[in-house]
Image (cartoon, rainbow, N blue to C red):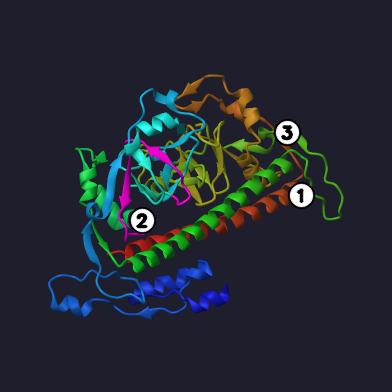
């Protein structure tokens, strides 16, 4: 593999700043797409000085290509631009087997994800105009997912789309992956946004799509760019799979640890004491500290990020103007949001870690632990959802208040816990934290590679 890479070395050229950016990011890519030589050349500067029009040249380009790109309308090099329709009869027409039926929710992350929705062969034959073929580009044209696109895989056999998904079928000498990558780029998304119709820009019609003006290189260069971006996508998929496997592994380990099926030994190789039954109030006390100092760092609970500033999470504050009556939390104190959400059927309990102080709504139940427990352990305990069974016991069945579970403060503080000794708590916490570190490392690699791809999409298209 290494020998092949040396023979077929991938090299991009561009401005100094862009090349430096690649230098810092390509080490995260497979060897087949790494760039070991960065030529620095500003393309088109001399031509620009002599002409009122800029030449059609990308900022970053593979070294074996030169010459200007050509500009053309998408409709001119497409043999089909159209969509399908939703069969009458509602969900009753859908089957567990048959011909795959594609809707807008099946197109995301530049990929086609089939969800097992099918229609009959008879219905498929009636909807010939909406037949999907391998190498078609699918583009969502309505709703909140407008602008999402993908290329139908080569091993796809047959299927149909509904009216919310447009089929773009290219003529020969045009690479579908290149065009789809362009549609996903900033330039392509701008065309899609500007092409929308209606006062609320709620959709884009076929004529607008046909009039997309796209700058295109030769077919070999299209292939090269598409192949390079596909390698970046493959790296992102590999990292995403690695992250999912680590998360799955952690979930399994937590199940074993918190059920007592998997136990650690102490420093002498002896068993730790049996876990003890306690109530939350035995190891914690409520925090009702009012925000007399008028701290403006208003926090919200995020499933992934924990207690985080509203300004950082929403890019704005959604709190009341006067927050002096809010609870003031100090670092390492906990807050319980009784609002149920995906993955948190009985609400989320999070620890303040990102800031020294912050304030939360009085709808939250806030508390702090004494020195009889490990904060890291309790954080993992709550994240696993060990407390949910006890919360279900005290929640008033069917009672909801603006999406909040009806759980009183005293009931919450008196829920039962089953805790190991402090030493075993620390061992469990350290083990799980080590897995978290690995997950976060992979997550950062995903984010950096996604950022790298975003930069490529901005600089490799005209």
3 and 1 marks in contact (CB < 8 Å):
no
1 and 2 marks in contact (CB < 8 Å):
no
Alpha carbon of mark 3 to alpha carbon of mark 2: how far?
A: 62 Å
Q: Secondary structure at mark 2?
A: helix
Label of residue 278 in the image: 3
Nearer to the camera, 318 or 250: 250
Q: Closer to the observer: label 3 or label 2?
A: 2
- Disc with the residue nearer the chain's start (3 vs 1): 3
Count how many numbered circles sit on residues in the image.
3
- Disc with the residue nearer the chain's start (3 vs 2): 2
Q: Which residue is mark 1?
A: 423
Nearer to the camera, 49 or 180: 180
Residue shown at 70% from the left, 46% from the top: 253
Can residue 376 be seen by looking at this rendering? Answer: no
Look at the image and say whether residue 159 sits in the magenta stretch. Answer: yes
In the rendered image, the quadrant that contains the C terminus is bottom left
Q: Closer to the observer: label 1 or label 2?
A: 2
Where does the image place residue 183, in percent across and percent down from the top left?
A: 32, 54
* Local crowd size for mark 1, using a 10 Å CA cut-off: few (<14), some (14–19), many (≥20): some
Q: Is residue 354 left or right of residue 44?
A: right
- Residues shaded magenta: 153-180
Where does the image place residue 169, in percent across and percent down from the top left?
A: 32, 49
Can residue 410 be seen by looking at this rendering? Answer: yes
* Local crowd size for mark 2, using a 10 Å CA cut-off: few (<14), some (14–19), many (≥20): many
Residue 33, placed above or below residue 421: below
Residue shown at 76% from the left, 48% from the top: 424
> Outermost residue toward the left?
52
Label of residue 176 in the image: 2
């Amino acid at each position: 593999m290494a020998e092949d890479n040396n023979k077929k070395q991938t090299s991009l050229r561009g401005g100094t700043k862009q090349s430096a950016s690649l230098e810092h990011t390509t080490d995260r890519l497979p060897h087949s797409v790494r760039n070991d030589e960065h030529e620095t050349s500003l393309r088109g500067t001399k031509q620009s000085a002599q002409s009122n029009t800029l030449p059609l040249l990308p900022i970053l380009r593979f070294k074996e290509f030169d010459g200007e790109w050509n500009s053309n309308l998408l409709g001119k090099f497409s043999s089909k631009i159209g969509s399908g329709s939703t069969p009458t009869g509602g969900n009753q027409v859908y089957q567990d087997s048959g011909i795959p039926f594609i809707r807008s929710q099946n197109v995301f992350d530049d990929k086609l994800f089939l969800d097992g929705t099918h229609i009959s062969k008879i219905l498929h034959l009636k909807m010939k105009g909406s037949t999907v073929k391998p190498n078609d580009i699918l583009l969502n044209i309505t709703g909140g997912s407008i602008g999402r696109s993908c290329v139908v895989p080569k091993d796809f056999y047959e299927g149909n789309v509904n009216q919310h998904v447009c089929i773009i079928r290219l003529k020969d000498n045009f690479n579908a992956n290149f065009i789809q990558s362009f549609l996903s780029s900033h330039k392509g998304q701008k065309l899609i946004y500007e092409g929308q119709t209606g006062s609320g820009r709620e959709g884009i019609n076929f004529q607008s799509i046909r009039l997309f003006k796209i700058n295109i290189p030769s077919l070999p260069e299209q292939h090269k760019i598409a192949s390079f971006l596909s390698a970046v996508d493959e790296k992102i998929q590999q990292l995403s799979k690695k992250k999912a496997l680590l998360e799955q592994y952690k979930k399994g380990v937590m199940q074993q640890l918190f059920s007592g099926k998997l136990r650690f030994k102490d420093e002498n190789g002896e068993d730790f004491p049996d876990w003890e039954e306690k109530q939350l109030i035995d190891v914690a006390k409520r925090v009702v500290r009012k925000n007399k100092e008028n701290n403006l760092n208003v926090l919200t609970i995020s499933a992934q990020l924990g207690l985080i500033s509203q300004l950082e999470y929403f890019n704005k504050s959604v709190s009341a103007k006067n927050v002096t009556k809010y609870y003031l939390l100090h670092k390492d104190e906990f807050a319980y949001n009784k609002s149920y959400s995906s993955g948190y059927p009985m609400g989320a309990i999070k620890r303040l870690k990102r800031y020294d102080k912050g304030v939360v709504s009085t709808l939250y139940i806030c508390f702090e632990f004494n020195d009889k427990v490990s904060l890291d352990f309790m954080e993992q305990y709550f994240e696993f959802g060990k407390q949910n069974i006890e919360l279900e016991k005290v929640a008033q069945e069917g009672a909801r208040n603006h999406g909040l579970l009806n759980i009183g403060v005293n009931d919450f503080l008196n829920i039962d816990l089953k805790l190991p000794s402090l030493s075993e708590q620390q061992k469990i916490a350290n083990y799980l934290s080590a897995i978290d570190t690995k997950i976060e490392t992979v997550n950062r690699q995903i984010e950096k590679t996604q950022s790298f791809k975003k930069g490529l999409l901005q600089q490799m298209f005209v």
